Every structure is written in structure tokens, then in C-alpha cells.
Image (cartoon, helix red, strand yellow):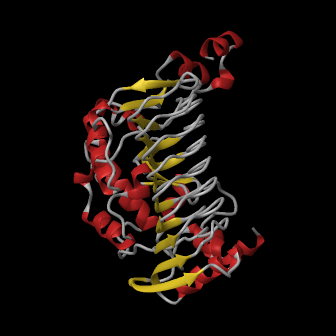
Amino acid sequence: MAQLKHRDSHDLGMHTEQLAGRTQQTFFDPAAEENFLYPGAFEVDFNKVAEIDAAELSITDVNLRIRELMKQGHGTINVKNPGAKHSLGVGILNRLNLNFEGSLGYFGCGLIDGPNVRISGRVGWSCAENMMAGTVVIEKNAGSTFGAAMRGGDLVCKGDAGSRVGIDQKGGTIIVGGRVGMNSGFMMQRGRMVILGDSGPNLGDSMYDGTIYIAGKYESLGVDAVVGEMTDTDVKWLTHKLAMYGLEAPNGIENITKIISGKQLWNYDNLEPMEKKLVL
Amino acid sequence: MAEKDLDKFITGDGVDTEREKWIGQHIGYRYDVNLVPDLEKMTPFLKTYIDTMGWKDLNWLEDVHMGYEEGKPAVFDRNINGWVQVPSDIHLPDNQQDRDMIARELLIKFQMSPKHPMVDLNRAYSKF
């Protein structure tokens, strides 16, 4: 932190205190002028359109080209021939419409914070892992660990997804139009997952919190995942969310099953050995 | 979490169950993380924000709620991994949905501020 010594944050106490609420209030001005973009974000215009042909470009070149176009103010970028290359469209912290005409490989659109991404083909493992905000819509199928450790935004796969969908999910909404594989929602901590088809075994295993809505059948629930009660707010939210992406629950939203955490694993380390056996 | 418990962490420490009394702290989140937003309660500021971003609903802000730290209302900023206390002159509505909308609005103002701690960190450590 040596470089922070002569900056404002040093004078405000960042060098000695934890980043706790009381400290942060000194930075905060609720009457500040309206600003909706991160400091340093590129000013882009959604009507300014650019195109990239990725056929002959390396992964790094495609990602740098996207950044360069955003810097020039392009708010809509169409990428042709992505060729299932890995790690395309990662780390975008900007408002942007990004369209891939084709399929992506592993780790596509990871670590994004803001853009609206549409992929006309399929995606490989770990699409949108650690996604922070924005929307990612995949028209076809997705591989395993779809939305791993996702933190915010909407991630939509209109086809089927592999196993461990939303593993370690920490926020956001994952919607799968078809089926999901085993261990989906494993160690989910918060956020929402909507499955319109069936699920493999161990749905929601060891989930700490969060909600899974499933319209089809589940092979089995995981440890500490239990059926919860649908509320009017749930129905209202699901109706709105599914309509946004042109999706429908096959048997109606009122017949969706809600899965939540039984919360028996909370504070697991403090349980007595016999209690641990009872929980598991 | 029921509406009647709205001020539970402002008026008390939230330690209720035998287990919590034994370990001396509340177990779990201090607000209902599973509460989905009521979009009818969205503020004009938030509407402008989601229009600017090209979204049709609250997007990542669905996971932002009014929480409580040290007995005071606060909102959690994931970018600094810390709580931001709500200024004391802001009136708290009597329902969680409205409180959540205020928390979302304040968090946007905080995160987009040039005084946000990430601005300094970005200047010091960013690679691009």
C-alpha cells in the first residue's frame, strides 16, 4: 500500500482501518450529481455499431479490439466467427451491447460488469463465471459450471446446461430454459436460479442461502436443500423475469417448485459431532 | 424475514436462538437475501440508471438490500467488501422493499463517485 500514502484515501484512514461502514461514510455524498458510470468507464453510444471478424484473430487480439472500440465510443459490437475460442469477451466493465454470431469456448464473458451480451450459438464450460452485472443470453446449450461463482446480473441459457450450474453462486439470476445436470446450485450462497426443465441429482447440495425455482422434476435434492413456499412476490418476479427473455414455464408459474436452504449446515463447525451426524 | 422484524437489528443485536446466545452472535444474514424486488417501488433515479445501462429491470441491484451494521442501517458494497452506513438524516420507510430501493440508490451514488476507494486503487494498481 506504499503508493497510497500520498493519496486522499490515506488521509481518510484507509491505511489503518478496515473497510467498515463508519469509515466509508466519510466518502459518501448522497446529494452528489447523478452519475451512472464507473469513474474511468468509456463513454459509448449504443447506436454506434462496429464489427469484428474473429476468424483470423487470437483471443487476446479480439478482446483488445473490443476494448479499443469501446474507447472509440462504439456501444454495439458484433463479433463474427468467434469459432468457439476460449475466454472471449472477458473483463468488460462498461455498458455495451456485445453480440457473438457463433459459439464460444471455455470461460466466455467471465468477470464482466455491465454489458449486455448475446450469443447466437453454444458456450463451453464456465460461461460468465464471476459475472458482476449485465445480461448474457445464450440461444443454444451451455457446458458445465455455467455461471460459476456468479455475483450479479442475468445469465440466460435457452437450451440445456451441463452439471454444476451456478456452483458457488453468490448473487444474480441464472435462467436455464431446458435441463440442468447433477449438483446444480452446489454451495449456492445467494442469488436465484430458474430451471424450466428437469434437474439431475443433488440439486442445491449444501446451499447456504439463495433460491432455486424449478419447473420440471428433480432427480434428488442435495444435503440441506428443502422445498420452500412460493410467495406472491416470487410469482410476480418470475412472471416479469421470464417474459423479459421470451421464456415460459411449461406447466405455468404457479406450478414451479421453490427450493431453499434448510439452514441446518449453518455454523457447521460449531456443531457437536452428534449434531453433525444428524444434519448430514 | 417477516415485516414485524424490520427494525430487529437496529433495536437489538438479533441474538435470539439458544445457539446464537451460546456463541454470542447472530447466525446468518441480517436481512432477507432471498427477498425479490417489487419493481413498482423503483425510484426515478434507479429507472434512469437501468435505462442508461440498457437493462429492463434492476439487474445486479436485485441482490442489494438494506442491511444493518453496528445497529445502524447500511448497504454492503461488494467492490470494497465493506459496509457503507446510510447517512443519519435519511428517513427509513416502514417496509423492507422501500428500504431496499433506497439502499440501491445510495450504493450507485457511492460506487460511481470519484471519491470511491476503488478510484485510488485503480490509479495505483491497474494494468491497462
Outermost residue, top side: A274
Q: Quadrant of residue A278?
A: top right
- Tell me the quarter of the image containing the N terminus of chain A: bottom right
- Say above or below: B37 vs A271: below
**Vertical relation: A148 (above or below) A3:** above
Q: Decide which of A130, B68 is in the foreground and name it.
A: A130
Q: Is A272 positioned to the left or the right of B22 in the image? A: right
What residue lies at 60% left-to-right and 64% top-to-bottom?
A104
Q: Nearer the viewer, residue A218 or A117?
A: A218
Residue that extends furthest to the bottom in the rendered view of this protein: A72
Relative to A3, say whether B97 is above or below: above
Q: Residue furthest right?
A: A2
At 57% from the left and 64% from the top, the residue drawn is: A103
Percent across and percent down for residue A171 are: 50, 48
Is residue A133 placed above or below A230 in the rendered structure? below
Give the x, y percent position of residue A25: 48, 60
Depth order, front residue of B101/A22: B101
Residue appearing at x 60%, y 16% in the figure: A279
